[in-house]
Amino acid sequence: MEIPEGYKAGFASLIGRPNVGKSSLLNAILGEKIAIVSDKPQTTRNRILGVKHLPNGQIVFLDTPGIHKPKHKLNEYMVEVAVRALQDVDVVILVVDAKEGLTEEDNLVIEHLSEIATKKPLILALNKIDIARRENAERIKQEIEQAIGIKKAVATSAVTGEGLDELINAILDVLPEGFPFYPEDMITDQPEHFWVAEIIREKIFNLTRQEIPYSTAVVIENIQEKPDVVVIDAYIFVEKMSQKGIIIGKSGRMLKKIGQYSREELERFYGKKVYLNLWVKVKEKWRRKSGSLKELGYYLKKE
């Protein structure tokens, strides 16, 4: 790849409270789905890296869990993932819901950003503008400007695509000149096992209610790819026997539905037939135990 003069490259962190549309925004910017989405808060549990390749630059996005008040160790892990993603980036994109307005959790995010904003450029993405009042978005912008310094504010919509080019250009404006960090054919660094587990977890989030989606974790035991088929063995972990019963469902219907929807998306991903074997196991209070979190893949390396 020949690097043109003035080529820019750097890292941009998407930060915000849960359910403001950070993952949907990232998928829309990249034009491909690399982050799972649902209408429930706290769907994202890990840092998701996505690479936007442009003729004049490369933006490495870090999608993060929503910042919130932790109730248990899994929540603490998620918030720590988000906070760490602020440290080594070149620019921070604060994503807010332009329809709902600022909440207590938004103010918590702003508190986390108060010190960062003095050291790094901060861009405000007024998201979901397609369903928001313009005057409401302007009021939110003014409130945030009073609290912390903003380099630029952009009204965005992952649904209609409004503001995405403007947001990309605003990010490029503040990135340093340099060589690309990733090759042209790479859009994410997610391992195959992680992505497959995320697809299954997304279906659980979209098909179940109340505490069930938050009490589940998915671990891929094995992926065997053959010329004409992919065989996947996966475990769904819950915290209680009653939750196991709900995930399985009457006559196994819920588990079959989770498997069917997951398999359909995985077949599109692999471009071939997928056999998905799902088992449900109970790991009591796993969200509250550091050891259980680590076993299920939720742990951070020491800095």
Image (cartoon, rainbow, N blue to C red):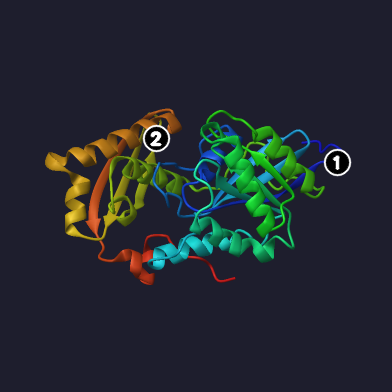
Quarter location, residue 164: top right
Q: Secondary structure at mark 1?
A: loop
In front: 119, or 251? 119
Residue placed under numbered mark 2 in the picture: 266
Image coordinates of residue 94 in percent, x first then y, are: 61, 51
Quadrant the C terminus occupies: bottom right
Of residues 246 and 93, the one nearer the viewer is 93
- For label 2, the crowd category at 10 Å Cα-Cα, with few meaning under 14, some 14 to 19 and many 20 or more, is many
Decide: few, some or many residues near mark 1? Use Cα within 10 Å; few <14, some 14-19, many ≥20: few
Residue displayed at 81% across by 41% down: 7
Q: Is residue 74 left or right of residue 216?
A: right
Identify which residue is drawn at 41% across, 31% down: 227
In the displayed structure, would residue 277 be above or below residue 290? above
Q: Residue at x 54, y 51 (%)?
A: 102
Horizontally, residue 276 falls left or right of residue 60, namely left
User: Extreme right residue here?
Assistant: 5
> Where does residue 69 sit, x and y in percent of width and height?
45, 64
Instruction: Mark yes or no: residue 270 visible.
Output: yes
Check disc 1 and report the residue beneath it.
Answer: 6
Q: Quadrant of residue 283?
A: bottom left
SS assignment at label 2: helix
